[in-house]
Image: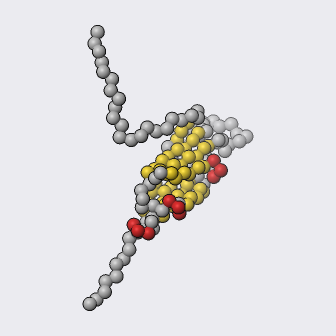
């Protein structure tokens, strides 16, 4: 009989929290753009309504959670159903270059737009040159 030693693998990041809710979980597609004043995050959240969307910022982590409760096809029987109830969850580590007190969000037509303004200290600025 052979003996095997089991070792716990080294982890470089903390473990993700365990889900306590049944159902599907979707990872929304996200595009991030940078301007001189802010980062703009666009997330696809089809079927999520503003009242079932939660955006939290704590300890440099921005977490987006949205819930889809119904498919929007009441009174109709689908021939093909690829759309299901579930949760959208996505998290981002936000650096100190973002002014967390001024983060704003809009949800329109299933697209979440998050504005992450930069702090004044990291915005590019033009230096005036004086002639001597």
Q: Residue furthest left?
A: 132
**Colour style of the rendered protein structure:** secondary structure
Rendered view: 130 above or below 64: below
Going by the image, does 73 lie left or right of 115?
Answer: right
| Along the viewing direction, whichever of 3 and 82 lies nearer the viewer | 3
Q: Residue furthest bottom?
A: 132
Figure disc tally: 0
Rendered view: 128 above or below 118: below
In this view of the protein, can residue 43 be seen by the observer? Answer: no
Rendered view: 39 above or below 126: above
Q: Quadrant of the C terminus?
A: bottom left
Q: Residue at x 51, y 35 (%)?
A: 18
The image quarter in which residue 33 lies = bottom left
Residue 129 x, y percent position in the rendering: 31, 83
| Along the viewing direction, whichever of 75 and 12 lies nearer the viewer | 12
Q: Residue at x 45, y 64 (%)?
A: 118
Q: Residue at x 66, y 44 (%)?
A: 72
Q: Residue at x 45, y 61 (%)?
A: 98
Q: Quadrant of the N terminus?
A: top left
Q: Residue furthest front?
A: 59
In this view of the protein, can residue 77 be seen by the observer? Answer: yes
Residue 115 x, y percent position in the rendering: 51, 61
| Along the viewing direction, whichever of 20 and 45 lies nearer the viewer | 20
Residue 131 x, y percent position in the rendering: 28, 89
Q: Residue furthest top?
A: 1
């Amino acid at each position: 009989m052979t003996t095997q030693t089991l070792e716990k693998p080294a982890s470089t990041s903390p473990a993700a929290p365990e889900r306590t809710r049944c159902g599907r979980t979707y990872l929304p597609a996200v595009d991030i753009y940078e301007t001189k004043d802010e980062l703009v995050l666009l997330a696809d959240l089809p079927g999520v309504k503003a009242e079932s969307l939660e955006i939290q910022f704590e300890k440099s982590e921005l977490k987006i959670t949205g819930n889809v409760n119904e498919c929007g096809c009441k009174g109709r029987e689908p021939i093909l159903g690829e759309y299901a109830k579930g949760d959208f969850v996505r998290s981002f580590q936000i650096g100190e270059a973002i002014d967390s007190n001024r983060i704003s969000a809009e949800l329109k037509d299933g697209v979440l737009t998050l504005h992450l303004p930069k702090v004044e200290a990291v915005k590019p600025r033009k230096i005036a040159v004086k002639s001597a």
